[in-house]
Image: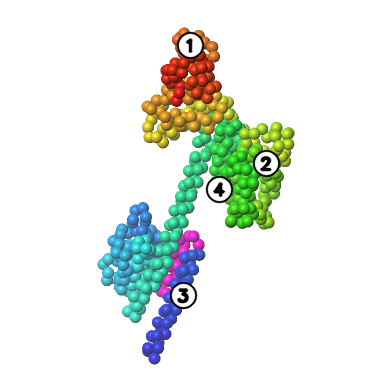
Amino acid sequence: METQAAAHIVEERHTAELAALLEVSKTMVSSFDLDRNLRRALRVLADMLGLHRGTVTLVEPETRGLRIAAAHGLTRHEVARGTYRAGEGVVGRVVASGDAVVVPNIGEEPLFLNRTGARPEKSDISFIAVPIRLRGEVLGALAADRVFDEAVSLEEDVRVLEIVASIFAHAVRLYRTYRHEIDAKENLSRELRRRFSLPNIIGDSDAMQEVFRLVGKVAASNATVLLRGESGTGKELIAHALHYQGLRPKGPFVAINCAALPENLLEAELFGYERGAFTGAVASKQGRFELARGGTIFLDEVGDVSPALQAKLLRVLQERTFERLGGVKTLTTDARIVSATNRDLEAMVASGDFREDLYWRLNVVPVFLPPLRERREDLPLLLDFFLGRFAADLGRPVRFSPDALRLLMRYPWPGNIRELENTVQRLVVLAEGAQIDASDLPPHILLHDAPDVPNGSMTLDEEVEALERRRILEAMRRNAHVQARAARELGITPRQLGYKLEKYDLER
């Protein structure tokens, strides 16, 4: 009878252990809150198996110190006192060695520190601590108390706690990976919000201050915005600012250049397609409007959209619905729509090349970006910004000479900021010293500065040289920089022309 009773006790113990392990497994996947899941799992061990004052002590990745991350049966102040160094106390020894430790009676164990102060009477308590380990790395320790009883098998407790510790280890690693990705995404989001904040967009001119004022107001809404301006004026930069300073900075920013794709490919990119919709569609693909859900879609060069596609765009703007190519299911999008164009949409509407109803849908809030020639007071700031950025990339200081800066300031920059940026980058890359001189500038900038008539402030020799330089540049440009043809037009020999090109440092 005693044997049967003992067997029954063992069977009940195993049943309770299996039930507890099942409950712990369910608890650890119940939410993304690791600390709460751990606390609930420790409560399960206490309620179902009598393993009280459970603690999960984890290694801090930065300091390599040990800290109680979760506990059951301890006060908040007791948990706060639970910090250790590797090798310190029983828990520290478990982490350092990677081996389980069993203390049958903590009152007789000098290594037991009672750091938390949760056990004022240390007698008649057994203490079990096992490593939380994954793929050879010890992440921390799981520990618990049991009321001292010689009839209870502490080895069985160790086996159960090691299984629980394995479950905890996978949860800790998964959570840390998840938090790392979330932190990286948040850091990227903060950096993008900083980079595309209005104070980081260069422009002190009245024209740009008016743009900033308008963008600051409209960013705090979901209104559709149409960015107007010449090519290279920074429309995409403003589109980014509208997104990252708006109501949905954590959502996606999806951009597409409507002029860069033929009509059929543009439609497939915007709305997506189903498998078999056309030759080569071997799998379904989401369109840009789907990808932009919860964020912003930027339709660059929207004035180049074909009339047929304009009708489909109008439906998205009006009803926020569309279908993939080859599909029958109606999809929706809540993406904010920001578009841009350098075309005269009003003239296109008048000529019938652009739908008037689409024009009004896009043109809810128009923002006009001034060309660089209308904000010349911003030129020194922009030149200094690009010069500093490209010089930093090369790791050496570079500056403009006063004459070079004067010529750059006088040039009208028909390509706007894009031309300015590319020009400064080329000058910095090709600079042979720490200073960019006037002679280093491209011929078209020098040509623009050449005087048409003497201005009275130059010596006779300087006026002759300026006129000669201008005539040479014009001849070279008209003759596609073929020296023999340019020399024939100028009435001089190719050798004389070569000498003058070298003298004025014009062929670079």
**Disc number for residue 19:** 3
Mark 3 or mark 1, earlier in chain: 3
Label 4 Cα crowd, 10 Å radius (few <14 / some 14-19 / many 20+): some
In this picture, which residue range is highlighted in magenta? Answer: 31-52
In the picture, residue 139 is in which quadrant?
bottom left
Mark 2 or mark 4, earlier in chain: 4
**Disc number for residue 306:** 2
Which amino acid lies under the numbered mark 1 shown in the image of this protein? Glu
Q: Is residue 140 above or below residue 273?
A: below
- Mark-to-mark CA distance, 1 and 4: 58 Å
Pointer 4 residue: 252
Q: Is residue 85 above or below residue 461?
A: below
Pointer 1 residue: 463
Tell how many labels. Answer: 4
Q: Is mark 1 on a helix, strand or loop?
A: helix
- Mark-to-mark CA distance, 2 and 3: 66 Å
Mark 3 or mark 4, earlier in chain: 3
Label 1 Cα crowd, 10 Å radius (few <14 / some 14-19 / many 20+): some
The picture places residue 421, in percent across and down from the top left corner, at 49, 32
Mark 2 or mark 1, earlier in chain: 2
Please report the residue visible at 60 percent of the width from the left and 54 percent of the height from the top: 281
